[in-house]
Amino acid sequence: MKVDIIIGKNLPSGLASKIDVIWKSHFQESWDSISPEWTRYKGLDNPEAYANDTFFIITDEERILAAGRLRPIELDFLETTYFILGVADIVAVEKGKGYGRALIEAVHARLIETEMTGVGFCRPSKSPFYEKMGFNIAKDLVERFVYKEFIGVGHSEDVLYVNGKDRFMEQVLAHPDEIVHIPVPNW
Ligand SMILES: CC(C)(COP(=O)(O)OP(=O)(O)OC[C@H]1O[C@@H](n2cnc3c(N)ncnc32)[C@H](O)[C@@H]1OP(=O)(O)O)[C@@H](O)C(=O)NCCC(=O)NCCS
């Protein structure tokens, strides 16, 4: 197993197509349930949307075993601008074989190395996986993350995060009446 870490704009189109198939097979249904617009932005057939993302790809000799990405997001909260990384589209092609661990360990290591805050959303049934891999989980927080353009993330999701040196999540948790406006269509 090896990990490739590639910036979106350098992702070969053949590799992007393969990842697109994997992501759509896992997430298309939930994208559709949020909005058709969401699906339009999410497809890797819209490469501009992914140009600045960092892709993490776990492969063996022949095939992709797991893939996910970090998206740089600039957002304002309480009059401070933060540069955080959105954790997104974490998928192991086959479950229970350590592929998800290899992927999320690489993502987590990048967050620790860069000392940047990482934030993502996941179904509560997946939260123990992220917790095991060193992420913090916040229940009942997702309602405060509001996309400016679209309706929002799935409201039954948990927020997963790694604290960065900007202490963004500390601020979010300390101000329970404040909304976090997400200035991108999705992450
Ligand atoms: C979540 C996901 C990436 C986990 O990947 P995986 O390859 O099955 O996980 P691994 O085999 O690497 O497991 C690593 C550890 O996490 C544990 N784990 C995995 N999923 C878990 C879960 N849902 N609840 C509790 N523990 C879990 C494993 O038991 C293992 O623990 P161990 O190392 O102590 O034995 C995978 O289930 C997946 O792709 N799901 C579909 C897409 C998805 O929901 N992604 C998350 C988006 S929010």
Image (tube, helix red, strand yellow):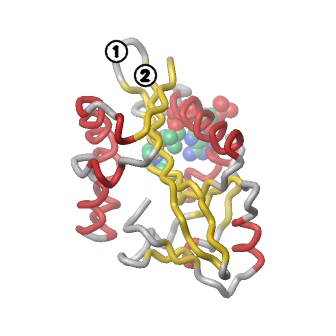
Q: Position of residue 27 (x, y in %)?
A: 34, 52
Identify the residue at horizontal 71%, vertical 44% (top origin).
Answer: 134
Disc assigned to residue 62: 1
Q: Nearer the viewer, residue 30 or 73?
A: 73
Residue 31 against residue 26 in the figure, above or below? below
Place residue 138 in its image quadrant: bottom right
Q: Nearer the viewer, residue 180 or 154?
A: 180
**Ligand 1 appears in which quadrant?**
top right
Tell whether 23 sits left or right of 182. left
Disc 2 secondary structure class? strand
Left/right placement of residue 58 relative to residue 149 reads right
Q: Nearer the viewer, residue 7 or 120?
A: 7
Say few, some or many: other residues with alpha carbon within 10 Å of mark 1 (under 14 / 14 to 19 / 20 or more). few
* Identity of the residue drawn at 43% across and 16% down: 60
Could you tell me which residue is drawn at 59 percent across and 58 percent down?
Answer: 84
CB under 8 Å between discs 1 and 2: yes
Q: Which residue is mark 2?
A: 59
